[in-house]
C-alpha cells in the first residue's frame, strides 16, 4: 500500500531555516502546512494495521558548527528534524506517524566545497516508509 503513496522529497533547508538555526521560517511552515494536510488525509486512507511513518531527515553541510545552541552538526541536523516533526504534530499529524533523524554532514548530495554544494547539502528529506 505504501508504494502507491507518494509523499517523499527533498527540501532545501534555507527555505525552512536560517543558516545555523533550527527555528522554522514562515516559508517552511507554509510548505509544511500542505504536507500536514496530505498526511492527515493519508492516515485516514491507509488501513490501521499498516505501520507507516514519515521519516524526517535533517542534514547539514560539511562546515563545522560550534555555537552556544549547537555544539555539532549532529545536534543541528537533529534539531531541524525535530522542529519539523513538532510542527507537523501541532497541525494534527499523529505523533506515532513521525520519526526525526539527524545525519549531520555525512550524507551529502554534492561533495564539492562550493556555496552551491553547501546549499544543496543543507536539507530536510522526507521519506514515507514502514515502521
Image (tube, rainbow, N blue to C red):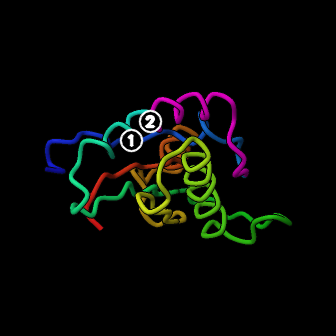
Q: Residues within 10 Å of mark 1 (few under 14, many from 20)?
A: many
Q: Where does the image place residue 96, in percent across and percent down from the top left?
A: 44, 63
Residue at x 39% of width, y 50% of height: 109
Q: Secondary structure at mark 2?
A: helix
Would you name the residue on which mark 1 appears? 39
Image marks 1 and 2: residues in contact by CB distance under 8 Å: yes
Alpha-carbon distance for marks 1 and 2? 6 Å
Residue 27 in the image: state x and y as whole percent. 63, 28
Quadrant of image for the C terminus: bottom left
Q: Closer to the camera, 30 or 51? A: 51
Magenta part of the chain: 21-36
Answer with left or right where residue 20 lies relative to residue 85: right
Where does label 2 land, which residue?
A: 35
Pick the front one: 82 or 123? 82
Q: Position of residue 67 (x, y in %)?
A: 82, 64
Residue 68, above or below 120:
below
Amino acid at each position: 500500500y505504501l508504494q502507491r503513496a507518494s509523499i517523499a522529497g527533498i527540501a532545501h533547508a534555507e527555505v525552512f531555516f536560517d543558516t545555523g538555526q533550527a527555528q522554522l521560517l514562515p516559508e517552511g511552515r507554509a510548505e509544511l502546512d500542505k504536507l500536514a494536510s496530505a498526511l492527515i488525509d493519508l492516515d485516514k486512507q491507509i488501513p490501521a494495521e499498516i505501520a507507516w511513518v514519515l521519516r524526517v531527515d535533517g542534514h547539514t553541510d560539511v562546515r563545522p558548527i560550534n555555537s552556544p545552541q549547537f555544539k555539532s552538526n549532529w545536534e543541528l541536523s537533529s534539531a531541524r528534524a525535530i522542529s519539523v516533526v513538532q510542527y507537523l504534530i501541532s497541525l494534527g499529524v499523529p505523533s506515532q506517524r513521525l520519526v526525526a533523524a539527524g545525519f549531520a554532514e555525512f550524507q551529502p548530495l554534492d561533495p564539492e566545497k562550493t556555496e552551491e554544494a553547501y546549499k544543496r547539502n543543507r536539507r530536510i528529506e522526507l521519506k514515507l516508509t514502514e515502521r
